[in-house]
Amino acid sequence: MNTFFKENQEVNILPENVKGAAIGKVIKAVDEHLEVEIPVNDVQFYHPNSPIELFVPAEEGMAYATTVLESVENNIVKMKLTNKSELLQRREFTRIPLNQEVLMKDDNTTCRCLDISAGGMKIESDRQLDMEKDYTISFSLDTGADINCYLRPIRISKDENSKYIVSGRFVLLTNIDKIAIVQYCFRKKIGGMLACLAVIVCGSIIFTKSVPDLNLLLYGATVVIPASLCMGLLGYLIGKIFDSINKTKSS
């Protein structure tokens, strides 16, 4: 069951609360049971019976596994694997629509976010931005996460309403904020797919006054299949985050 996680190996560990995301060290690995040493300051985010996700860089992508936390002793978390370790292939950032006000701190003006990913966002602005400048921005997700970073414009166009559409990438985005955005995009994507499937099933029941047949359900299920790919995406993105931290620490 445990193929990728070995003793004395650094592992990227993610609890339910992304604020507890950390780099831990596997101190014991026996079958599906793992013991991981984490930073003392992060212990507060780890609770028995809560789900924990593990990621570790691999040659062709990212190794990923889900676990349930069995106990916490000092700064040692003991967990049990709940699925077979998977090798996730590399994917691009998941981008989702987001209608959210963004504060441009440089001049205390606001603009409108159109979509977002862990790598950057697209905004609608009343003024043209400078392609050579990084803008200090702040915005909130409906999960309660407050994001503060810089936005570097990489493409600017003008729409039919004379608004400037700016595609930009995040600069100096903290590890915690990036993980918060990754999780937000992932959950929104999955939620949208499940909602589509629910509409198909409920619509069939309402209009045909019967349970949908197998063919219709199979058709609806094709909407949800990409959800498994999104899990691979999540593993890769978070792995890249922690991998860059490892490189920074070693340099």
Image (cartoon, helix red, strand yellow):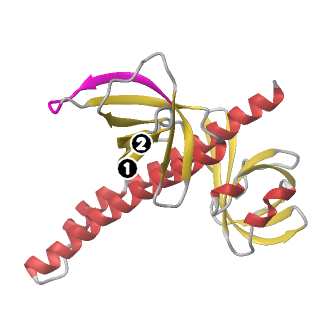
Q: Position of residue 170 (x, y in %)?
A: 52, 33
Three-letter code for the amino acid on which mark 1 is drawn: Gln
* Disc with the residue nearer the chain's start (1 vs 2): 1
Position of 215 compared to 168: left or right? left
Q: Position of residue 245 (x, y in %)?
A: 73, 35
Task: Give the label on residue 100, or none.
Answer: 1
* Quarter of the view holding residue 61: top right
Task: Give the label on residue 47, or none.
Answer: none
Please name whichever residue, 15 or 158, is drawn nearer the observer in this view of the structure: 158
Gap in angstroms between the C-alphas marked 1 and 2: 10 Å
Q: Is residue 82 above or below residue 228?
A: below
Three-letter code for the amino acid on which mark 2 is drawn: Ile
Confirm or deny contact between disc 1 and disc 2 (CB under 8 A).
yes
Element type at mark 1: strand
Q: Is residue 237 above or below residue 38?
A: above
Q: Position of residue 13 (x, y in %)?
A: 71, 53
The region drawn magenta spans 151-161
Please give the count of numbered marks on the rendered protein: 2
Task: Give the label on residue 116, or none.
Answer: 2
Most extreme residue toward the front, as rendered?
A: 107
Element type at mark 2: strand
Position of 185 compared to 20: left or right? left
Residue found 88% across the figure and 61% down from its top: 75
Q: Main secondary structure of the magenta part?
A: strand
Q: Is residue 148 magenta?
A: no
Q: Residues within 10 Å of mark 1 (few under 14, many from 20)?
A: some
Residue found 73% across the figure and 64% down from its top: 45
Residue found 76% across the figure and 34% down from its top: 246
